[in-house]
Structure formats: C-alpha cells, structure tokens
C-alpha cells in the first residue's frame, strides 16, 4: 500500500508539471504522462477518500502553478496586504482543486480495480467535473485540459466536440498509456492501436476546412497603450491616456482598429464628445472602424463593461455578459468581501445573453471581453452569423506574471501597434451547432453504465453469501 503523504506529494508535483503543457511553454505531451501518473495513484488508493485527497493534491498543483497570477491581481492592484492576498489565492486554488478531487472520489467509487473499467471511468469522471467547474457559480474554465493540446493532433477533434471533448480524449489517451505500460500483451497491443488511431484521426480532422472564407482579408490593428494598471484610473493620468490612444489610432493603418478593455477609464457619458468625434473623423477618412473598451452608464444607474465602435460604420455597442465574480460583480451576501478590494467599477450589470455581431469593416464581428473567450458554449451563440471573433482584454491586472505571456504578441508592457491581416469565415463547425451536449451526455452515460455494473456486481456478491 502506498504512503498517503508520498502519494499526495507525487500528485501535487504531477499537477504542477501539467501546467507546462499549456501556453506559453506548450509541452503538449506532458499532460499525458502526468495524468497517467494520476491514474496509477488513483488505482492504488485504498479508499475513495484517499483518491479524493490525491485528486485535491493534483488540482492544487495545477491551479497553484497555473493561477498564481491571482496573487498579483489581489496584492499589486487590489491593494490587499500580502498575507491576505496569499490566503485569498490559496483559497481560490483550493476551491478549484475540489473538482479533480471529486473526480477522484467518483473514479474510486466506480471502477478502481478492473483496468478496462478504469479506462472509461477516468476520462468520464474527469471531464464531467471539469465541465461542472466551467459553469457552477458562474464557472471558472481556466486550465481546462483540452487547451493544453492546441499544438497536438488531438486539437483536430475540437471543431467536433469542443474543449471538453479534447479533455476527454487527452485523459483517455493517458489511460491508454497506462494500459500499454502495465496491461497484458493483448491489451498493450490494442491500446497502442487505439492511441495511434486517436492521434491519426485528430491529424486527419485538422486537414478539414469546416468553414469558408468570407470577403477579402481584413487588415487589423491591435493597440497597446501600456497604461500602468495602478495609474490607469487616476484623474491626473486621464488626459495622457486619451492622448496616447488617439496618437496610436492615427498611426495605425488597419481597417479594424481594436483598443483594450476599458481603454477609456471613465464612463462614456463623462467623455468629452469632441474626443470621440475626432476618433470617428480619423477612422472615417480611412474607411476604418475603431473598437474602444469603455464602461457605459445607463440613465437608470446600471453600468456595463462594454466596447463601442466609431468610424465609417454606424456606432454599435457590445456589453459583457459573463462577469468576473468580485472583480466585476458582487455575489449576493459578499458585499463585505469587496470592501477589501481597491478595484474600480466592481459591480457591473450583465449584458444580453444573446448579443448580435457588429457590422464593421465589411465583416460581422463578435466581440468578447476578457475571460469570456474561455466559455466556448457562450461564444458560439454569435455563430455562425459572425465572421470574426475579437477578444478585448486588459491583462495589466496580472502584472509581470505567467498570465499575460499566454496572449502577448507585442513586447510585454510596451506601447505599440500590432498590425496584420485576418480572414473572415462563414459556416459552422459541428461544435457550433451542438455545443457541449454530446460530450456531457457521453460522460453521464458512461458513468451510469459503470454504476449499473457496480450495482450488479454488489448484488451478485450478496446473493452468493
């Protein structure tokens, strides 16, 4: 029997190493090995409680390494004292670690001993709880395992079954590796063939063009003002902020120009109309459109985290519909927590759940703000009508941590304009049409079958007494 402390330590290390499979390191084979190790630990667990503990340790490793930037947001910009920010970060990671812990408990209850049963229980339990993590209490889908396979042949499955389907395939392949290493000769051969089939199928699917080009390639310009987060909302920096973005807009050559989230750090109704008129004139002269992140306050007192367009096309607006708990809205009963934050505009209202794309620069543009791009089931609500997806973010909240490196293309913390061409597309992938329902139902069906099998085994055992 394995030592509980040694097993938990091994699971913690495996979880931390899993993060290297995600961008920016993107060592996509690594999660197969770390998850194979987790499966071996779970199969040797003496009780479901022990499997829960190992799953928690694995999750603590994943989120402790992969979401450590939360500390930067709380301490550097939320102005929390270091001990309180550390406690908050640990609590956040611990809550997220409960999901792989629950997957471990479920796995141990369903199919710990027979390797064939474990092979299906492992991906079903993992994927189901990963999906639950993506929507329970508004959801936290960061570090969904499928995202580690962007550069892997398995990414070819994403247009069919989405990120959770790729998570399922990743965990299943990890289980097949365990069979290759520990199974009978016939099982090893069968598992090797299954692995080759999975990767071959994924690579084949990557060759399929699920959509077709719409219109000519569009020149876009992404603007980075490099406004320090701790100075962004200070009144004496406001004029300089507007000046920087106006200058960058004038220097850009894109037909679609995109500014960051809350690029204008003041309610739209408080912005000098002449400033927006100047931006509109500059853009219209070039037949361009500018997307600007700016908070909007309605007459009834509600306010929204929004982007607006100005330029050659009629002005349009998108309001963020999936808000960040505590950072952008206050969950009921938690007002006392928000008092410890120094985050401006922390109680936004929800935008519509089914927004329409914006007609800009000859394309239908579906904006999303910050972490909304992690919710695939919500992004597809604007598809297949939209031809372009545009994510508008302010990653300055994460400071000089791991988080901004994932999306940085301009030098980090440098003012500048990134220009290039993008191609709009029309059509829809199978995932756009059906969403997460098939993979979730498949996981539930597998778990139901394993529960039924276990009940039958227990019933036969009782009859034989």
Image: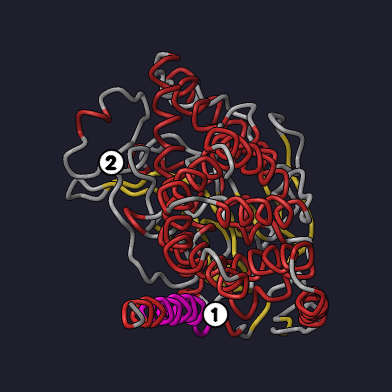
- Helix, strand or loop for disc 2: loop
Q: Decide whether the magenta segment is chiefly helix, strand or loop.
A: helix
Q: Is residue 403 above or below residue 173?
A: above
Q: Residue at x 68, y 76 (%)?
A: 157
Determine whether, in the image, residue 187 is placed left or right of residue 75.
right
Instruction: Name the mark on residue 132.
Output: none
Where is the C terminus found, in terms of image quarters?
Answer: bottom left
User: Does 13 appear in magenta?
Assistant: no
Residue 337 found in image quarter: top left
- Closer to the observer: label 2 or label 1? 1
Residue 118: give x, y in percent of width and height. 57, 68
Q: In the rendered image, is residue 2 in sight?
A: yes
The residue that mark 1 highlights is: 432
Residue 62: give x, y in percent of width and height. 58, 42
Q: Earlier in the sequence, mark 2 or mark 1?
A: 2
Residue 218: give x, y in percent of width and height. 73, 67
The residue that mark 2 highlights is: 347
User: Does 439 appear in magenta?
Assistant: yes
Q: Is residue 143 above or below residue 342?
A: below
Where is the N terminus found, in terms of image quarters?
Answer: top right
Q: Residue at x 64, y 53 (%)?
A: 257
Residue 200: give x, y in percent of width and height. 83, 79
Q: Tags 2 and 1 in contact by the CB under 8 Å rule?
A: no
Look at the image and give the residue range highlighted in magenta.
433-455
* Residue nearest the observer in this picture, 367 or 419: 367
């Amino acid at each position: 029997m394995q030592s509980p402390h040694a097993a938990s330590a091994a699971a913690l290390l495996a979880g931390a190493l899993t993060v290297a499979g995600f961008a920016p390191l993107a060592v996509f084979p690594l999660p197969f090995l770390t998850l194979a190790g987790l499966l071996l630990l779970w199969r040797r667990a003496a009780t479901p409680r022990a499997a829960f503990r190992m799953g928690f340790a694995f999750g603590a490793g994943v989120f402790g390494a992969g979401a450590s930037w939360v500390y930067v947001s709380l301490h550097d910009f939320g102005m929390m004292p270091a001990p309180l920010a550390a406690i908050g970060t640990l609590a956040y990671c611990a809550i997220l670690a409960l999901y792989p812990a629950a997957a471990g408990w479920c796995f141990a209850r369903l199919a710990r001993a027979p390797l064939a049963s474990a092979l299906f229980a492992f991906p079903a339990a993992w994927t189901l709880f990963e999906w639950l993590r993506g929507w329970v209490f508004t959801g936290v889908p960061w570090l969904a395992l499928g995202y580690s396979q962007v550069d892997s042949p398995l990414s070819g499955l994403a247009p069919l079954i989405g990120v959770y389907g790729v998570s399922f395939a990743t965990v299943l392949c990890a289980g097949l590796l365990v069979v290759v290493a520990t199974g009978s000769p016939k099982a090893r051969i069968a598992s090797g063939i299954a692995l080759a089939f999975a990767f071959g199928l994924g690579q084949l699917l990557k060759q399929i063009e699920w959509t077709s080009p719409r219109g000519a390639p569009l020149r876009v310009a992404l603007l980075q003002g490099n406004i320090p987060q701790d100075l962004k909302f200070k009144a004496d920096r406001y004029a300089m902020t507007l000046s920087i973005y106006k200058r960058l807009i004038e220097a850009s050559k894109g037909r679609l120009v995109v500014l960051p989230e809350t690029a204008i750090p003041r309610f739209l109704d408080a912005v000098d109309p002449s400033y927006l008129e100047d931006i509109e004139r500059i853009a219209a002269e070039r037949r361009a459109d500018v997307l600007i992140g700016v908070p909007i306050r309605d007459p009834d007192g509600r306010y929204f985290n929004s982007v607006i367009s100005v330029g050659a096309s009629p002005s349009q607006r998108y309001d963020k519909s999936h808000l960040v708990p505590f950072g952008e809205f206050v969950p009921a009963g938690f007002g006392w927590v928000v008092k410890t934050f120094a985050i401006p505009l922390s109680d936004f209202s929800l935008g519509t759940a089914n927004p329409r794309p914006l007609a800009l620069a000859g394309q239908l543009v579906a904006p999303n703000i910050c972490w909304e791009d992690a919710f695939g089931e919500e992004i597809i609500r604007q598809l297949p009508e939209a031809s372009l997806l545009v994510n508008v973010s302010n990653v300055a909240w994460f400071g000089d941590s791991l988080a901004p490196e994932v999306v940085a293309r301009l030098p980090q913390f440098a003012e500048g304009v990134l220009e290039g061409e993008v191609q709009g597309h029309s059509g829809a992938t199978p995932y756009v049409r059906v969403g997460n329902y098939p993979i979730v139902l498949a996981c539930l069906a597998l778990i139901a079958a394993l529960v039924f099998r276990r009940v039958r085994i227990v019933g036969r055992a009782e009859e034989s007494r």
